[in-house]
Amino acid sequence: MRSTIIAALAVVTLGLAACGGEEPQPVAPPPPPPAPPAATASAAPTDTTPPAPPPKPALADVMPQTMKGIGDAFNAHDAQKMASYFTDDAAIYAYGEGETHSKGDMASGMAQMFQAFPDAKSAATRVWVKGNVAIAEIVWAGTMSGDMMGMKATNKPVGGTRLHIMWFNDDGLVKEMHQYGDGASAMMQMMGKKGAPPVPTIPTNPPEMHVSKGTPDEDKLADFGKSVADTFSKDDPKAATALFADDADMMMNDGMPATKGKKAIGKLVPSFYKTIPDMKDTVSNAWGIDGFAIVEHVISGTDKGPMGPIPATGKPITGWHMADILQPTADNKIAHDWGYANTNEMLAQVGALKMPGGDKGAAPAGKPKGK
């Protein structure tokens, strides 16, 4: 390396001498070293945050799907599928028939029902929806070709109209349900009794739907329903009859024809007070929905008069659960009154009927549920 430098200096010296002593020109500096390659920019960090879940469907959209699922599962006789639409701790009060407090017990009860009525079918005829509450009028029919609760199969056709009031949780599952079906009429049908109501035909058309509009008028309808119960608690048949329009009709879910006209209703109403002269009518829930007043209420008092062919017992009625759907006129008279109850519940309370497994369907008078 050093010899190379010396040789280079010699060459330079010789060159200068050859130029006749001219001043040496400055030597150009060496080129700068190449710049180091620019650092590659690091890639942006990857976002590992999972995407936000899709928004939960509105409860108003889920509730009809749940009700349809329950109906489809009933008609398929799939008790487990029916139970899947209920919360684990769902409370079901079938007044006069019994109650359950878990979807497992509910599934077991439905399985027994399907064994007794293997051809049972049902369909909703009318539905009312407000907030997280749905009220469904249901028609069902089947043949008692299996044993049920100690009663041997009779192979008789059975069916009727029921009202189911359901409360839903935020996921669209049923968390509580109140059922009103007349067991007395069903027993008459199962036993083939003379005078038993006819078994209804299952409708095939979609149910009539009524959805709350959330108007102040609906609050007034709820108050109207409460006022009817208050009037019936006054032991005043004339005041109770005055609630009805001249062309009103009143129907119970016992399968019998409706009572039509205020005059006919005026003859029927006094019989209520002959049976329960100290009657108290306590409202537990009331809704106004799309022109209807819907009221859950509980009758209490003393059985002091005959009910049809059943003589008075003199025993207390501790809580006979009922529901009424009222459609008023423009001047607040009752145009239509559809009532739902289980006569067996009252008969069991006064000792006129022994229910299999005891009277588990009764609750203390006036105790509100569904809150």
Image (spheres, helix red, strand yellow):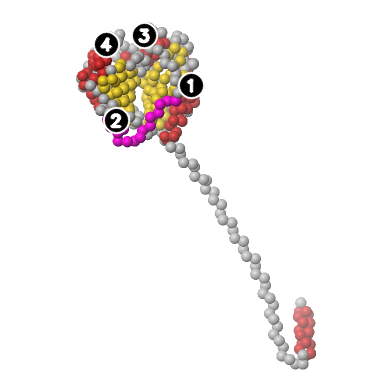
- Name the residue at 22% across, 18% down: 237
Closest to the observer: 180 or 371? 180
What is the spatial separation of the Cα atoms under label 3 and label 1, in whole angstroms?
A: 28 Å
Quarter location, residue 28: bottom right
Answer yes or no: is residue 337 visible.
Answer: yes
Tag of residue 195: 3
Answer yes or no: is residue 280 visible.
Answer: no
Residue carrying label 2: 221
Write down the region rendered in magenta.
Answer: 206-224
Residue 180 screen position, x and y as percent:
36, 21
Residue 15 screen position, x and y as percent:
78, 87
4 or 2: tag closer to the N-terminus: 2
What is the spatial separation of the Cα atoms under label 1 and label 2, in whole angstroms?
A: 35 Å
4 or 1: tag closer to the N-terminus: 1
1 or 2: tag closer to the N-terminus: 1
Quarter location, residue 97: top left
- Name the residue at 42% across, 35% down: 59
Q: Secondary structure at mark 1?
A: helix
Q: Are marks 1 and 2 in contact (CB under 8 Å)?
A: no
What is the spatial separation of the Cα atoms under label 3 and label 4, in whole angstroms?
A: 18 Å
Residue 223 screen position, x and y as percent:
27, 30
Q: Amino acid at mark 2?
A: Leu
Query: Of the residues tagged 4 and 2, which is closer to the observer?
Result: 2
Q: Amino acid at mark 3?
A: Gly
Residue carrying label 1: 75
Q: Secondary structure at mark 3?
A: loop
3 or 4: tag closer to the N-terminus: 3
Q: Amino acid at mark 1?
A: Asn
Closest to the observer: 358 or 115? 115
Residue carrying label 4: 306
